[in-house]
Image (cartoon, rainbow, N blue to C red):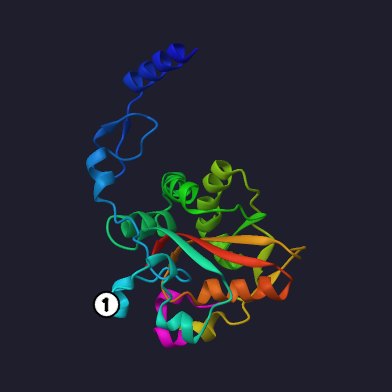
Amino acid sequence: MLMVYQRLKYIQNYLFPGSCELCRRRVDTDHDFCAECKHSLPFHAPGCRICAASLWNEGPETPPSHSEWVCGRCQQHPPAYTSVIAAFDYQEPVSNLVLDLKYHGKLHLARVLGSQLADKLATAITAKPNIILPIPLHRSRLRSRGYNQAYELAKPVARRLGIPVDPWRLYRTRKTPSQTDLPRRQRAGNVRGAFAVNGNVEGMRIALVDDVMTTGHTANAAAEALIRAGARSVDVWLLARA
């Protein structure tokens, strides 16, 4: 049976070769990047065990145990979420792929990038949450874009890990300006109280999925709403950490 599968795979790759998402070089259909381009991706290195901020943001002295290190910001103002896991740093070429997904309608990139996040999570998490919730868009933005990129990223993660995903359990109560358009000092107030829960989350361990985290205010506001509604814990799974 294995020999039959291998032969069929060979025929598929020969007749319908895939191409690398970055350099367009031919690759097998079950690969999205060639080996050279995949090696160049900005994989996220261990950082703060809560918010995943880079170790280098804290200065030249690296703590002896990366797994226990907590950044100064999380020590002074602990967020509502328990931890953040990110697949990449928000740098080129990943940043360009994210922009293509969000603003240029390249929806197939959700599968490509979501699969990379799933690969990271498969080795990084120690216990599965009860449910995956994508960070929601306001309904007006969802109508204009046509899809929620966080939900599209969450789909391959949910399939790979065997965890249910619900795009409607968490929703936005009001339309807010894009966080990327605001100075950092205004971002916390922009999303404070902007999320609410529709349905039961009592006692649940929840994973929030989003594309990019910069200040963490959006994820924190969403986690606060879930904790108030009775969630046991909230972790954040990101494609990229800025």
Between residue 222 and residue 127, name the one nearer to us: 127
Query: Residue 61: x and y, percent?
Result: 26, 77
Residue 102 vertical placement versus 163 (above, below) = below
Q: Is residue 168 visible?
A: yes
Between residue 21 and residue 49, name the one nearer to us: 49
The reply, left or right, for residue 209 in relation to residue 171 is: left
Segment colored magenta: 176-186
Q: Residue at x 55, y 75 (%)?
A: 220
Q: Residue at x 47, y 74 (%)?
A: 216
Q: Residue at x 67, y 54 (%)?
A: 130
| Mark 1 nearby-residue class (10 Å; few <14, some 14–19, many ≥20) | few
Residue corresponding to mark 1: 61
Does residue 181 show up magenta in the picture? yes
Residue 221 vertical placement versus 101 (above, below) = below
Q: Residue at x 60, y 72 (%)?
A: 222
Residue lying furthest front: 64
Does residue 195 show up magenta in the picture? no
Answer with the quarter of the image where residue 215 lies.
bottom left
The reply, left or right, for residue 234 in relation to residue 24 is: right
Quadrant of the image for the C terminus? bottom left
Query: Residue 217: x and y, percent?
Result: 50, 77
Q: Amino acid at mark 1?
A: Glu
Q: Is residue 173 visible?
A: no
The reply, left or right, for residue 229 in relation to residue 45 is: right
Q: Secondary structure beneath disc 1?
A: loop
